[in-house]
Every structure is written in structure tokens, then in C-alpha cells.
Image (cartoon, helix red, strand yellow):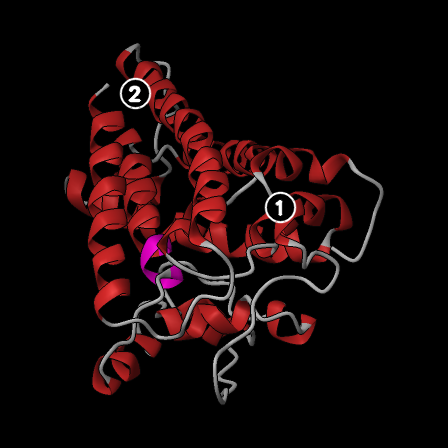
Amino acid sequence: MGESVLRAAAFLAGLLGLRAGEVLAPDHPPTVPLARRWVANLGLGLVNGIVVSALCGLCFLLEARAAWPVPLPLVQWLPGLVPRIAVAVVLLDLVTYGLHRAYHRTPFLWRFHAVHHTDLDLDVSSASRFHTGEVVLSSAAKLGVVAALGLPAAGLVAFEVTLLACAQFQHANVSLPVRVERMLWRTFVPPAMHRIHHAPDRSDTDSNFGTILTLWDAAFGTLNRRRRDGAPAFGLPGARDPGRLGFGRLALLPFRPASGT
């Protein structure tokens, strides 16, 4: 229960804080009405939050009943819980980077991930716009890694909270000082980097896969620093009608005949 409250508190703090930043210092003007998007995005986020909370709760339950795998030597040798949690966060960020690339390269997985890329605007609510099928698949993969390495359950919770905060930040429609932006390009994924990932051009969409650290894109050759002029465009070429991107249609999108998405 504690991890669910922590994640909910982090979600609300990020949502309200970054929304205030979007109002005070937006990077670009919105192009479609906010209300319809937020209903769809936050509706998906609510369902997915339940799934992630169940995953974290399962980890703690297994750990409490001594049913958790013994840590691998690399993890066992770390002095104390805090270093183990830090290692878990970094390793799971790498796993998430790999999963993200797989969602773009595998047609079956792209059907689910395309829901995220249909958003015609980008703001803090876009961080919640994921199909539940994708969340279940990703959660299963991350749980497998945590169990295989014997990472602490607290490490998974710390990662999920950090992931949530970083996802909200990188999707936020906020304008940052130039110095801060430059520093973030070398460390943590900034909004400007992730906006390129949401451009309609597939060559841009298939780049900048990182969620927390920019390290993985730099190391694996997927970092894209394309400069843009004017207001950015988002979404997918085959899904441009806002009236067809509501909660119900997004939930069914992966199961419809293949289209431009």
C-alpha cells in the first residue's frame, strides 16, 4: 500500500507542478483542445497506475515471504540497500531503453506503443498515454530482470517513481533556460530531446529512446540533436483526427486492422 501512495503522490506533484510550468513558460502553443486529450491520457494513466502498483506489491509480497531469488554476486557485494537500489534504477533504465527500441522495431509491439505516439500535442499528461497492454508487457519484462538478478523490491519501486517523474518532465511543454537544457542533454533526458522522438517523421521517431539517462542513446548511436524552427508537430501521419483519438478508440487501436499508425 505504501508504494501505491508514494507513486500517486509523485504523480500528482509532477502533474500539478509541471502543468503550472506549462502555463507560465510554455515552449509552444497547443494545437488541439486540452480537455479531450487529458481525459484520454489520464484515463489510461489511472488504469496503468493500478497495474504498476500491483506489480510492486507482488515484489514486496514475495520478498516478505522469502520467495525472492538470491542476488547475483555483483549485487550481493554492494554495501547496503541504497547502492543496490541505485544499481537497480540504472539497470532498469537500460532495460527500458531496450524495450523502447523493441516497441519501435517489432510490428506487434508497435501496435501497442503507437497509442502513445498518436498524441497530437505534447504536455505533462502525455506521460500517462500508454496502452495497458504495453504496460503489462513492460512490467513483466522488468519483473523478470529484477527477479533474475535478485534486485531489491525497493529498487523496482524507486525506479518506477523515478521513471514516472522523468517521463512527466520530458513530455512537459515547458521552456528551459539554455544552460539547463545543455546540461541535461549530457545527463538526464530533457523535453527538447524527447520532442524530437514524437515528431511525425519516422526517422525522428526512431531516435532518442531514453527515459531517464541520455547515456544509452549516446552509447548505442540513437541520439538525435535535430534542430527545429517554429512550433513542433507531433503525432503519427495515419492518425490526425482528434475526434478519433478518445479513450475508447485508443484502447482498441492495437486490435484494429493495420493502418498508417
Q: Up-down: is 237 above or below 159?
A: below
Q: Residue at 40% x, 60% y: name it.
A: 171
Q: Secondary structure at mark 2?
A: helix
Q: Main secondary structure of the magenta part?
A: helix
> Which residue is most to the right?
257
The mark total stands at 2
Say which residue label 2 marks.
Answer: 60
Q: Is residue 235 left or right of residue 195?
A: right
Q: Quadrant of the N terminus?
A: top left
Q: Which residue is mark 1?
A: 245
**In the rendered view, would you say 141 is above or below 30?**
above
Please state which amino acid type lies under the numbered disc 2.
Phe
Residue 234 falls inside the magenta stretch: no
User: Cα distance, mark 2 to mark 1?
Assistant: 37 Å
Q: Residue at x 45, y 55 (%)?
A: 94
Q: Does dot 1 land on a helix, a strand or a loop?
A: loop
Q: Disc 1 marks which amino acid?
A: Leu
For residue 83, above or below residue 155: below
Q: Compare marks 2 and 1 and give the one earlier in the sequence.
A: 2
Instruction: Report whether residue 101 is seen.
Output: yes
Residue 51 position, x and y percent, is: 45, 26
Can you tell which quarter of the image residue 166 is in?
Answer: bottom left
Q: Are marks 2 and 1 in contact (CB under 8 Å)?
A: no
Q: Position of residue 204 (x, y in %)?
A: 61, 74
Question: In the rendered image, which quarter contains the C terminus?
Answer: bottom right
Residue range corresponding to the magenta coloring: 167-171
